[in-house]
Amino acid sequence: MPRPHVEFIQSQRIAWRPHTEGLLAGTDSRELSADPLTGACTRVVRYPPGYQGAAVRGLDADEELFVLDGALLIDGRRFAHHAYAFLPAGHPRGVVRSDGGAVVLSFYSARPAILDAPWRGDSPAARLIEHIDCYAVPWEPVRYKEMRSGALRKPLRKDPVTGDETWLLTSPPHGMPPGGAGARETHPTVEEVYVLDGDLHGNCGVMRPGAYFWRPPGILHGPYGTRRGATSLYRTVGGPLVAEWTADKAPFSYDPPYTPVLPPGLELLPEPASADESPF
């Protein structure tokens, strides 16, 4: 079974699970999606104040991370709020610690096993992104077909080997397709999104901070809009983002019903008491 379609879940509805061994021992996490065959997964990892992990040679998987809250130190380098990195498999990782605690969105290309011997695989230095302070990255204007006007993008990664991309996207308030209807789209790659701020209204419901989806290739979706504006982290798996649009248009609504696509057996906590409840 391939990695299942998840669209969408408020991460607040997934219970924190403690880790007692392995890479994340001493932390807890919410697993947002996972591949049952390869172990590739996306997690929100919570590091407690005073956390210090053991020295780690490296991982047998690519690790991509984005700090949602607090600050983390990796091999002495400080990753503060909205810092980003992409560490290819085999890259020296050193000690991870957090003085005041941290919440980190973490993506692993395979089961995140700790290397117990020197890395023998291919790990091009060109794939490494050691640290990005996302506050220092300028916003760039972007205009997708049917995208509400004024959208801005911060590019974070374009992998020179896989073509995979990661970026931040923000849209101003009162966004909707012109005329109240818009074309729908599909992509030949996986599209993965985590909402950081605001609200995003689409065909599966209203996504708020902490909302997440893993959308396999070829899934028809849209159109989208936003009342208060929205900022989200986007990434692709399988190459760069290419949009294929329908010729017909679908009606847009600011009040779509919540109609999620979720893996069977997923255990969910009750709905948050408030739409603005912190995802941490």
Image (cartoon, rainbow, N blue to C red):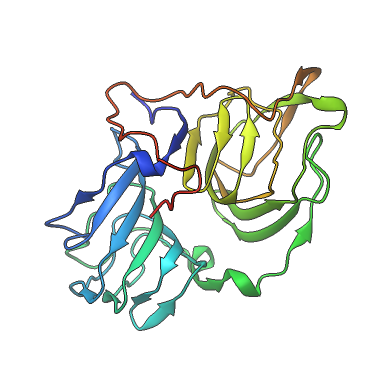
117 or 167, which lies in front?
167
Q: Viewer-proximal residue, 103 or 220?
A: 103
State which quadrant residue 263 falls in: top left
Q: Farthest residue in the top direction?
A: 248
Percent position of residue 195, x then y: 54, 47
Q: Is residue 115 above or below residue 175?
A: below
Frontmost residue, 234 versus 100 = 100
- In the rendered image, is residue 120 in sight? no
Residue 245: x, y in percent? 76, 26
- Residue at (52% x, 66% y) in the render: 82
For the view shown, which residue lies furthest in the right direction?
Answer: 179
Q: Give percent across and percent down for residue 217.
A: 55, 28
Residue lying at the far left in this picture: please name it. 20
Q: In x, y percent, where is residue 119? A: 28, 64
The number of numbered discs placed on residues in the rendered structure image is 0
- Image side of residue 85 versus residue 202, left or right: left
The answer to whether 55 appears left or right of 140 in the picture is left
Between 188 and 8, the residue placed more toward the observer is: 8
User: Which residue is situated farthest in the bottom direction here?
Assistant: 76
Vertical relation: 24 (above or below) 275: below
Quarter placement of the C terminus: bottom left
Q: Does residue 20 show up?
A: yes
Residue at the spot 80% in from the left edge and 34% down from the top edge: 146
Residue in the picture at 31% in, 21% down = 264
The N terminus - image quarter? top left
